[in-house]
Image (cartoon, grey):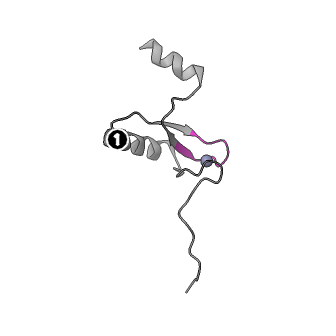
Amino acid sequence: MPAYRKPKLRCHATGKRPFPDELAASCMADSLSRKYKTTLYIYNCPWCGNWHLTKRPPKSSATLKESYGR
Ligand SMILES: [Zn+2]
């Protein structure tokens, strides 16, 4: 049997748990947002190409514009 098992997936750049797609990330963000009564955002990681959760809103001005529009 293998002596060394693959460790839990972690992004080497952020140390965060990676999600393979936006849907999985947003599902988790939604569930954790309710659990911790906070707002979580998702973003596409430029280092690993997966999605991560973050407490800070994305800096993208395009996203901000969309929010203001509503
Ligand atoms: Zn990453």
| Residue for point 44% across, 36% down | 40
Q: Crowding at label 1, few (<14), some or many (≥20) Cα neighbours within 10 Å? A: few
The answer to whether 63 appears left or right of 32 in the picture is: right
| Residue for point 43% across, 40% down | 26
Q: Using the rendered view, name the quadrant where residue 10 is placed.
A: bottom right
Q: Secondary structure at mark 1?
A: loop
Task: Inspect the magenta stretch and tell me whether residue 56 lies in it.
Answer: no
Q: Which residue is mark 1?
A: 36
The C terminus lies in quadrant: top left
Task: Inspect the magenta stretch and tell me whether residue 47 lies in it.
Answer: yes
- The residue at the far top in this view is 69
| Residue for point 63% across, 46% down | 49
Q: Using the rendered view, name the quadrant where residue 34 is placed.
A: top left
Q: Position of residue 41 (x, y in %)?
A: 47, 35
Report the amino acid beneath label 1: Tyr
Magenta residues span: 44-52
Q: Is residue 61 above or below residue 31?
A: above
Q: Position of residue 37 (x, y in %)?
A: 33, 36
